[in-house]
Amino acid sequence: MFSGDGYTYEKPLLYYATMVMLENRIDVVQIHYAYEADLLKKPLEDVTETLMADIDTVIEEVLQNGEYQDSVFLGKSLGTISIANALMKRQGFSGSKILLTPLLNIVPVFESLLKSGHAGLLVIGDQDLHFDIDKIEQLRQTRFQIEVIPNGNHSLEIGEFDTPASISAWPI
């Protein structure tokens, strides 16, 4: 699992995703990282390289015993950069991809998703700053299942303090 910048594993989306995986006897590896505030101001190649330096170390450690045949990558916002720009381009990582609020307005991220050929789930709110209906329609032509949360923001929450609507917005 790859968290967002400021959206940590204790927040609802990642907490409940973790719980569902554990309930289904799926081993969970949460990669915890912290970077300088100006990381996202750097060129995307530098951002990806910085993220992957940390992520590759963890992946190598987890895979060294050879126990795993399949993988699921779940990323939220910043965490979707490493999935789209690096992991989806590697042989051997054809498993499931779950992208929560991907940064579609970053052209290389969008293009990587569009060209990937991978299946996965992409969830974004229509009030997210990275939501773009034209890009969503293009991605609907791929193997991604797209879920757009009406009135959902970048945290996939509805409104400022509408907890019931935020909870019920998810198609289950």
Image (cartoon, grey):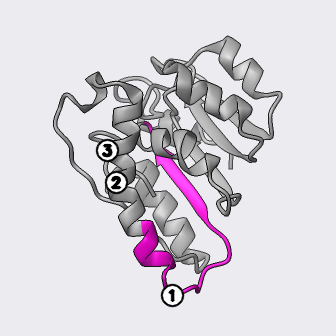
**Residue at left offset 35%, top offset 29%:** 161
Residue type indicated by callout 1? Asn
Secondary structure category for the residue under label 2: helix
* Amino acid tagged 3: Thr
Residue 50 figure quarter:
top left
Name the residue type under label 2: Ala
Q: Is residue 9 visible?
A: no
Q: Nearer the viewer, residue 163 or 148?
A: 148
Q: Nearer the viewer, residue 11 or 141?
A: 141
Asked whether the beta carbons under mark 2 and mark 3 sit within 8 Å of each other, the answer is: yes
Segment colored magenta: 59-77
For mark 1, give the secondary structure: loop
Task: Say which residue label 3 marks.
Answer: 50
Q: Secondary structure at mark 3?
A: helix
> Circle 2 sits on which residue?
53
- Which residue is at 60% across, 26% downward? 110
Q: Are marks 1 and 3 in contact (CB under 8 Å)?
A: no
Residue 140, percent from left and from top:
78, 28
Where is residue 62 drawn, in percent x and y? 45, 76
Q: What residue do we see at 30% from left, 28% from top? A: 40
Compute the Cα span from label 2 to label 3.
Answer: 5 Å
